Image (cartoon, helix red, strand yellow):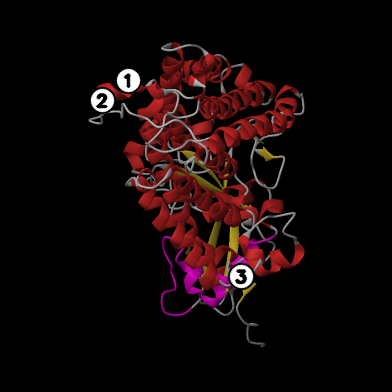
């Protein structure tokens, strides 16, 4: 069974596991700091209401046993603690079976969050973390060499992630085929970052080169992941560089970081030996029979479950970021099959006036990440995920996306709900909630370099229309 393990990837596994634990840590912290306002007992889309409508079979989660905000918070902060312990090496201090149990615990906890997270957790990187986290259970610890089959399955995830994204672009918006999508993308992406303005204002020929390079990286380079070394490491390095470019140009939660983490598992251990002050163990234990059987069963299961993602990839009606089972074990991925050409933003405002609203002073609620004040430079938040800010971007595209949660959000603002206000950057009504709130639709565009020099603004915005037909009132205005 010498072929079953690969000692040369001992350091690669160590790097991968520590980095994956860091992603888990960010994911759990993101849940801990935002869940109460979004989906707590008194949140915008309460978990108890969701659990009453869905069975365990439909949405596996430990919270079907019992739910309370305190229990959810305890589980999430426990996930934070376990992730931190793995980062410092806890899974390598215990027997292999105990290490696998720790990785299983992280996966079960996060699966339980995602499956009750509703619209707030409907993103591809949630499924990606669960799929990769499940494979990590079978990698073993520092006492043995990593199983070859699990290393292969990690490459299979990375291949589907990159190749699926490349296919959906080529099949989707015509601007990907004529190489013009980056004329718009940096400006219209869900949450621009601090360098997005600079990327947007690069010369258009360079944008076309970027798109061509992206197609090469996503449609050609992934096949190199299955080639012998050093070709596989070179392919992984190209993917890492491309993902770092995306990290600089926008805020995509932990999608790019987790893609990099997957690519790290492909890099030959000799490369890591040259840069890390860690000596690989030379006396490695053979894998126990139970682990061999578990890895073989895992590989067979992934092979069977891969039928649906592969069929989806070759389909003309390719689905983007889709899970075919409630455990998110083998998923389809993809992003930006269609690129928005014009950026719209929903701006929320409130007033303390009781009447004559046309003449009232309206004050704007500022969000942490999404564009608001034109003079405010976009901030870097990724790999942290601002869930409400992202959903506000979808709401600007179509009110359908906002139907489950926008009116509850406005009601929370009228009530001055502390948990909801913590999700925002500013509260223009610190002493007393407003009497009315309204939602307006604006068109945003990045300023040109000349406009930026003249005004100091990063954005230029134009009022389009009232997003809602009328303001929402805290109390009925006085009669007469």
Q: Name the foreground residue: 18 vs 185.
A: 18
Query: Do labels 1 and 2 touch, CB within 8 Å?
Result: yes
Visible in this render: residue 366?
Answer: no
Q: Seen from this angle, which residue lies furthest left?
A: 277
Query: Relative to residue 242, is residue 349 depicted above or below?
Result: below
The quarter in which the C terminus is drawn is bottom right
Q: Is residue 432 left or right of residue 69?
A: left
Residue sitting at 65 percent across and 22 percent down?
A: 167
Query: Do labels 2 and 3 touch, CB within 8 Å?
Result: no
Visible in this render: residue 223?
Answer: yes
Q: How far apart are the two marked residues, 3 and 1, measured between alpha carbons?
A: 47 Å
Which residue is disc 3 drawn over?
Answer: 67
SS of the residue under disc 1: helix
Res 219 → quadrant: top right
SS of the residue under disc 3: loop
The percent coordinates of residue 92 (x first, y second) are 36, 43
Q: How many neighbours does mark 3 have within 10 angstroms: few (below 14), some (14-19), or many (20 or more)?
A: some
- For residue 275, which numbered disc appears in the image? 2
Q: Which residues are magenta?
A: 404-432
The percent coordinates of residue 385 (x first, y second) are 48, 49
């Amino acid at each position: 069974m010498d072929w079953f393990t690969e000692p040369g990837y001992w350091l690669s596994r160590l790097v991968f596991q520590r980095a994956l634990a860091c992603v888990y840590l960010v994911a759990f912290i993101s849940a801990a700091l935002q869940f109460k306002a979004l989906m707590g007992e008194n949140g915008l889309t309460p978990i108890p209401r969701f659990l009453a409508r869905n069975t365990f079979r439909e949405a596996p989660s430990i919270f079907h046993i019992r739910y309370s905000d305190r229990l959810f918070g305890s589980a999430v902060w426990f996930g934070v603690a376990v992730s931190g312990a793995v980062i410092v090496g806890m899974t390598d201090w215990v027997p292999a079976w105990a290490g696998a149990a720790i990785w299983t615990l992280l996966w079960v906890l996060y699966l339980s969050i995602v499956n009750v997270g509703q619209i707030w957790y409907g993103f591809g990187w949630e499924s990606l973390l669960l799929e990769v986290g499940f494979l990590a259970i079978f990698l073993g610890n520092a006492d043995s060499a990593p199983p070859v089959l699990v290393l292969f399955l990690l490459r299979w995830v990375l291949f589907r992630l990159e190749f699926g994204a490349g296919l959906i672009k080529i099949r989707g918006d015509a601007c990907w085929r004529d190489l013009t999508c980056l004329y718009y993308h940096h400006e219209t992406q869900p949450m621009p970052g601090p360098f997005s303005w600079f990327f947007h204002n690069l010369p258009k020929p360079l944008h076309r080169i970027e798109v061509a390079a992206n197609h090469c990286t996503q449609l050609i380079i992934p096949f190199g992941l299955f080639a012998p070394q050093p070709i596989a490491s070179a392919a992984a390095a190209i993917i890492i560089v491309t993902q770092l470019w995306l990290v600089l140009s926008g805020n995509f939660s932990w999608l790019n970081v987790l893609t990099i983490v997957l690519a790290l598992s492909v890099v030959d251990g000799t490369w890591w030996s040259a840069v890390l002050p860690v000596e690989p163990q030379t006396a490695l234990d053979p894998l126990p029979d139970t682990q061999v059987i578990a890895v073989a069963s895992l590989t067979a299961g992934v092979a069977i479950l891969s039928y649906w993602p592969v069929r989806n990839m070759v389909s003309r009606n390719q689905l983007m970021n889709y899970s075919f089972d409630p455990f998110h074990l083998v998923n389809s991925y993809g992003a930006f099959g269609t690129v928005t050409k014009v950026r719209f933003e929903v701006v929320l405002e409130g007033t303390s006036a009781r009447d004559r609203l046309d003449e009232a002073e309206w004050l704007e609620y500022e969000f942490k990440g999404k564009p608001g004040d034109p003079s405010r430079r976009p901030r870097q938040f990724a790999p942290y995920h601002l869930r409400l800010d992202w959903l506000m971007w979808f709401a600007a595209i179509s009110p359908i996306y906002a139907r489950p949660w926008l009116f509850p959000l406005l009601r929370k603002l009228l009530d001055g709900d502390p948990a909801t206000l913590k999700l925002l950057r500013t509260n223009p009504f610190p002493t007393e909630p407003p009497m009315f709130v309204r939602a307006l639709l604006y068109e945003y565009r990045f300023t040109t370099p000349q406009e930026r020099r003249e005004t100091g603004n990063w954005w230029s915005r134009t009022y389009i229309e009232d997003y809602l037909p009328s303001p929402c009132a805290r109390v009925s205005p006085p009669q007469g």
